[in-house]
Image: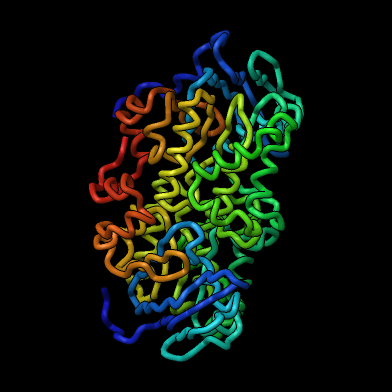
Amino acid sequence: MNGAPRAVAGAEPVPAGRDAILEVRDLWSGYGDTMVVRGLDLRVPAGQTVVIIGPNGHGKTTLLRTISGLVKRRRGEVWLAGERVDGRSAEYLATLGMVHIPQGDLLFPDMTVEENLLMGAFLPRSWRKRHAALEHVYGLIPGLRERAGQRARTLSGGERRLVGLGRGLMREASILLIDEPSLGLAPVAIERVYAAIRDIHAQGTTILLVEENFTHIGDVADIVHVVEMGSIVRTGPLEELSRDQTVVQTYLGTL
Amino acid sequence: MNDRELRPVLEGRALCKNYGGLRAVVDVSFEVRAGEILGIVGPNGAGKTTLFDVITGLTPATSGDVLLGGVSIADASVHRRCALGLARTFQQPTIADSLTVLENLYLAASFRRNRREGGRAGDIAEAVRHLDFVGLTDRADTPAGPLGVFDKKRLMLATALATNPRVLLLDEPFGGLNPQEIDHVMRLIRTLRDGGLAVVVIEHVMRALTSLADRVLVMHHGAELFVGTPSEMLADPQVIEVYLGQRHGADLTQREPRA
């Protein structure tokens, strides 16, 4: 193991980012007295899929929640398509096409699967295209069509996650934030979900995705950032990071 | 497999659970012995957690029987089943957030099988032993609510052990954990198995499940699709079709990390 300094991306100046859909500068965020995101810089170029890897409790989910306006930032800036948006409401960010698919499913328990999906098309311009969007989502995600008329509260944990993912795909996104899409899913469902993410990526959608480890991101990641203690400690293409023994031992494990 | 006890500790016989017209569990039978780990897998919505709910009495079976140590517990309440030696964990961390880590263990111990002698000092000693085992001793006096996922999952395991079970049902113990944390929890489960506990694990993390389980039951649409060893499961065309997927199946067979 060599003793090279670990900080890479965090130390680089953030480029002016003409092509970045999303840009985060020196972002600090947290709960009460605890700062969870600590001086994080990030660029998500248009049309790319950027993946953030890191351990539990190191700020990945809080980062997404802060970007989408669900958690108020303490310091720093968030830019979406050239517009400064930190401090703006989640509702406003939604009208700009920011779609956040959270880790918990947050479904409406007494609505059916289809009604929950339709809630994802709540903006007027999405509502007009809702029938086509439904067909698209039913085609992408396994098992939803069969459960269309079933109330969300009667679904299994994994099925609820699939509905939550489908709901996020019901409208066009300028950027899609996805929090641990593989969590709690059967292997074949993970395969389908990642195939869906690849399709969405191929259509040109910009994606910022958070995962616990490298296992599933092989085909989708254009660039990978490793987050520890609330800031980015490593950055690179997956092939490069997967040659780094420290990173591999931490995020691939030995089974 | 350890055959110190030939008779199954836990047995399900032709279990069925209907919710209105929905058949969540369809004629499922299984058995697990002391010192054995039975894995349960299947697509999302296959009825795995509902099967746990039926076994533990959270919801009554529509038909069929559950036997613990050869005796039917189908009519027993949830806490009675716990006192007879059946403990479970949940997908989501299910602990008392407002209590400290140690208080969570005292609460669990009040449902314990075989009331223990030794009074207060004995309670503390036993609770500390379980915290030591899962590696949470230094968190004993911390409120449980703000703990991270890994700590909460270990606490939930410790509270299950505090009931002194004969059978441990684990619902996705590895979900949301990183590889090192998964390794840690796997070591804990192996130790418990070697100590003679019968363990049933629902899990989607295949690398962990296939290396832990002695046998695997695959459920599909509520019913049994396959029963066999992990390596038989990985090679079964039906299981690959409905559960593993072509790619994932190939990855697991090779056991090579994909980069």
Depth check, front residue: A46 or B27: B27
Residue visible at 30% across and 29% down in the picture: A243
Residue visible at 26% across and 73% down in the picture: B1
Q: Quadrant of residue B167?
A: bottom left
Q: Position of residue A244 (x, y in %)?
A: 32, 29
Residue visible at 32% across and 71% down in the picture: B194
Residue visible at 55% across and 51% down in the picture: A145
Q: Quadrant of residue A81?
A: top right
Asked whether residue A36 is in view, the answer is yes
Q: Is B4 on the left or on the right of B156, as rendered?
A: left
Asked whether residue A73 is in view, the answer is no
Q: Is residue B50 above or below residue B92?
A: below
Give the colour scheme of this rendering: rainbow
Depth check, front residue: A177 or B207: A177
Q: Position of residue B211 (x, y in %)?
A: 30, 58
Position of the N terminus of chain A by quadrant: top left
Q: Position of residue A195 (x, y in %)?
A: 43, 38
